[in-house]
Amino acid sequence: MTVVERLREGLGNRVIRIETPNPKRVYLTILPEDLGEAARFVWQTLDGRYVTVSGIDTSSRIELLYHFSVDREDTFVSLRVFLDRDRPEIASLSSLIPAMEWIEREIWELLGVTFRGHPNLKHLLLADDWPEGNYPLRKKTDGA
Amino acid sequence: MARRRVVIPIGPFHPLIEEPEYFALSCEGETVVDVEWQAGYMHRGIEKISESLHWDQVTFAVERICGICSTSHPIAYCNAVEDLLGIEPPVRARYIRSVVAELERLHSHLLWVGLAGHFLGYNTVFMWAWKYREPILDAFELITGNRQHYAMMKVGGVRRDIEDDDNLRLKKILADARGKIEMLTAAVLDDPVLAARLKGVGVLTPQDIKNYGAVGPTARASGVDIDVRRDSPYAAYHLVEWKVITGSAGDVFDKAVVRLLECKESIRIIEQCLDAIRGTKGEIDAKVREIPPGEGIGHHEAPRGEVFHYVRSNGTNRPVRHKVRAPSYVNIPTFRASCIGQTVSDVAIILAAVDPCYCCTERVQVYNRKTGRKELGFDDLLRLSREKTGLIAREVRR
């Protein structure tokens, strides 16, 4: 069974959209509330290796991509979630995958996404006295 | 009576700076009970800068992320953009990419072996390893014009060809290096003192590797058989014969073994690539003009592990988002698993074992939390580390 077939079978109707620009890249869109279950499926059942998370400000929404590599199949599975740009918030995965602790801190400070249940949500790369509400990777939408 | 807990700050700055970091080790007596990591002292915002550069300029910007593995980021970035485009570079360019990438692995691993020796009080190893690293840097100068920051990569290919004259000179340099590296490998691996000093120290289990997403020699030393070069073939790695080196114990000794044996494999790869392109001519550039809207993921096995790049294009001449994840970002958090329960005299070498960049380990100081007085400096910790080696050496000889 291919990775895409296993994803469809394992996640069922939680899958909103699957994009495969080529056989080695799978971008899977899900709802933010399904992230925990989807990540557990990819990380444990598919034995995906946690790679990183990347966040993008699309000017209308905040988009997070949780990248996992299924090394045996030479395939990247990226879980895509969209968050409200005014109040971006999602559950922390650091209790499932310990490595998430650091990248969630980075996304919190650079994009302003709040991770519910994070044990230690404080600055990682920016200075401790960095001005609150100033997120460097947010796009300027007011023409400023 | 409750034991007194002291915090040992490690870092953040040192003149050798590559990646300044700060570690707070909480210790009870000699034993480390917790590790806290802070980074960002040299955060230059390259991801943000990248959004304001032309696709071609980004290749140079990412080359400056790291001075030691300076070709790893351009390769991963080019792989990402080529993934977006759905193209592959010409075969000759693939061979040249592998040559440059493996030369880099050679010099980076030799640098690590030397520094690891230095931390343990084995300065002979340090002198040897750095002496044998020098011709590798000369080889870089020969084929790229620079000892560091080679500027060889471009989206769709490479910038410079390797001419037949240089090809032969490079073969000569590698033939010399092979004997010396074999001698160094044998000397390090057969040394009973190093074995006694490093075996069982800073162990990472396969589950630790999975939890922290650790990569490269750090993962392979724990028996986790992953290597981007084999698992996700790019450049010329599927066109030549070589094997992935793995360990089993997950301790500092196995990390050294993996790195030393990888040097030999790197030489094999480079020699086969050079043979394949000698006496032939061919295109080295796919001549990419425009980058269409889309997204791409690229990765590359750098000396320290997988480098990951994600790019997104909206059809303009600049990336709209560019995410970079270096291997140390996932390797460094493993300290929480490898340092806890170990003694302070072993911490310098455990931290050094993932090859994080030495600025971290050169500024260890022990403070008494109550009085705020410095009790041990980095020199003292080096002394402790070396004394332990000396002690083991005497026991082994007895």
Image: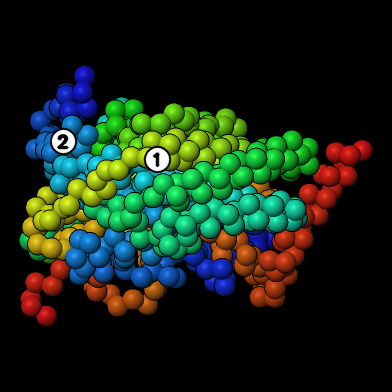
Q: Secondary structure at mark 2?
A: strand
Q: How far is the residue under mark 2 from the one under mark 1?
A: 33 Å
Disc 2 marks which residue?
A22
Residue type (three-letter) at the residue carrying disc 2: Asn
Residue type (three-letter) at the residue carrying disc 1: Arg
Nearest the viewer among A90 and B165 is B165
Chain bearing mark 2: A
Q: Residue at x 24, y 46 (%)?
A: B283
Quadrant of the image containing the N terminus of chain B: bottom right
Across and down, in percent, residue B263 comes to 55, 41
Horizontally, residue B11 falls left or right of residue A119, namely right
Chain bearing mark 1: B
Across and down, in percent, residue B397 comes to 89, 39
Q: Is residue B37 above or below residue B280?
A: below
Residue B130 visible in this rendered orientation of the protein? yes
- The color scheme shown is rainbow
Q: From the viewer's perspective, is the residue at label 2 or at label 1 nearer? A: 1
Residue B108 visible in this rendered orientation of the protein? no
Disc 1 marks which residue?
B278
Nearest the viewer among B196 and B280 is B280
Q: Residue at x 32, y 68 (%)?
A: B45
Q: Secondary structure at mark 1?
A: loop
Quadrant of the image containing the C terminus of chain B: top right
Q: Is residue B386 above or below residue B273?
A: below
Horizontally, residue A130 falls left or right of residue B258, namely left
Q: Is residue B256 above or below residue B310?
A: above
- Report which quarter residue A56 is drawn in: bottom left
Q: Residue at x 46, y 30 (%)?
A: B242
| Same chain assignment for discs 2 and 1 | no
Q: Quick one: which residue is furthest to the right in this view?
A: B398
